[in-house]
Amino acid sequence: WEHYLSCDGTPDPTVPQQINTFMSLWHEDQDDDIQLVMEKGEVVLNLIEKLEFLLLEASPDEITENQRDQYQEFILQLQDLLHQKYNEATQNLLKVTSMYEDSETGNMHTVIEDKNSTFCIWVNLKKKARFKNHVFQEAGHGFDLPKSLALSSVAVRMLHTRYDHVSPLSASLKENSNNKDDTKETDDIKETEEEIEKNSEVLDVPSQGIWLFFMCSTAKVLMWSILYEEPRGREEAPKVVDLQQLGPVGGLYHIDALQLPPQAQDAGDWSMVQVLDVGLEVYPYSPGEAEDGTQAAVQITLRLPDNVIYFKVPVVARWDPAGQQWRTDGIRNITYEAERKSITFGMGAFYTVALLQDAHLNLPYQAWELQPTGVDEGLFTVTAVFATIQIQIKDNQCMLSSVVVEDEEVLSHITGKWTSPFALREALKRAGVNIFPAEYSPKYVP
């Protein structure tokens, strides 16, 4: 009903005919430029978000298992289509690079940005060794290439998406989800008051840990956790990332070396270009040796997002598409500058990169308080390890009042907005403030 009243021309993602028509029409249109892809991409991201929240909020009796599988398939198709469109638009831009030469270097570079992504591209037209590095001033990202690449016809693309469509593909996440009850979290949130009252009897047994319950009207449970006192020793960090322990914060950085397609040639009043039916091609780069005998690496500098908090030095990881996993090998010489909000590192090849943060670094809670402010209204305050979070609750909605870190209020872009508990939880996680324990959290929190 809300979608019908909005009358905004977008498809209803729960209606197969509408979503299939939407994807088919955009798939056939191959003349988009980057700006158009960003505009259409915002629609795609909203559709994905609607489906994701529907899967989170709906109880088993509200949608069938077949519908759940179908919605999940729509999400994957939309994610894949959006990235495919970025590749097509990149190829369209690379065909006319000579039209955008920089007068100083003779190379081409540009930055295109919206609230969901930042697209940076540099094209090596002159192939001079002294122009082997570049900083995209508008974005703060940059690179330093080995000499072999500086002398080659190559383009470097740095696409920062503030969303993560890669981690859900992780083999480790799929294995973990198959080893537990997928509907457990939804069932816990949908518990009846009688079940909550029964569970509260556990409070009298200290060995069972501490159960934290928060209830307000129809938004019955915002968060809960069991925090055991059993200590765990630290083990050497593995090269394959455990996504239950570490999670990407601030989106992903798709860093690619690309081959240049045939360029447009002027012939009188005509502009001619050879069309190849191969799509966007990756430049076949294999690292050689530097002058000092070490492996020549690509050096990358990333400016961290302003609307994300990193409480500690983030872990830099690369996506391994063959193994469907995040890995920390292949990344070296990491330099983190917290005040300048930048991180620099070397890579032996070009990868999709994420900055990971410990999902449990704000646990266990130092204190928490639920203060009634009216009928079916309350203020919930959590004092975590690095931050103090205040959440207002009214009926089945909640609103982030403040997040205070080191006596300073942060994340103003997500405060003061009434939303569902699911939406608020996801917004805080994306911003790097994860105060929500999962069923596996006792493995990582003493």
Image (cartoon, grey):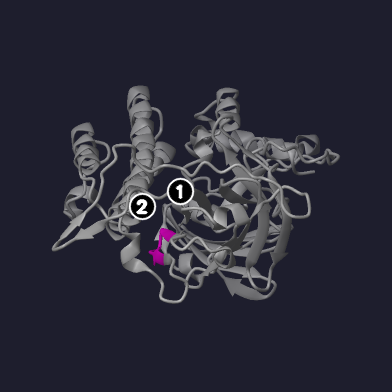
Looking at the image, which is closer to me, 337 or 109?
109
Q: In the drawing, what numbered circle is on residue 90?
A: 2
Residue 112 part of the magenta segment: yes
Name the residue at 40% across, 43% down: 53
Residue 74, image x and y in percent? 33, 34
Looking at the image, which is closer to me, 195 or 21?
21
Q: Amino acid at mark 1?
A: Leu
Name the residue at 70% across, 41% down: 329
Q: Secondary structure at mark 2?
A: helix
The residue range painted magenta reads 110-119
Residue 296, image x and y in percent? 68, 50
Name the residue at 34% across, 29% down: 63
Q: Name which quarter of the figure residue 16 lies in.
A: top left
Q: Are marks 1 and 2 in contact (CB under 8 Å)?
A: yes
Residue 176, image x and y in percent? 60, 28
Residue 43 against residue 286 in the figure, above or below: below
Question: In 3D space, how far apart are the residues under numbered discs 1 and 2 (Cα atoms)?
Answer: 10 Å
Q: Amino acid at mark 2?
A: Thr
Q: Which residue is mark 1?
A: 258
Residue 416, image x and y in percent? 45, 68
Residue 109 against residue 189 in the figure, above or below: below
The quarter of the rendered structure image containing the C terminus is top right
Left or right, 87 with respect to 177, comes to left
**First in residue order: circle 1 vs circle 2:** 2
Residue extending farthest front: 268
Q: Secondary structure at mark 1?
A: strand
Left or right, 86 with respect to 28, comes to right
Looking at the image, which is closer to me, 395 or 296?
296
Magenta stretch: dominant secondary structure: strand
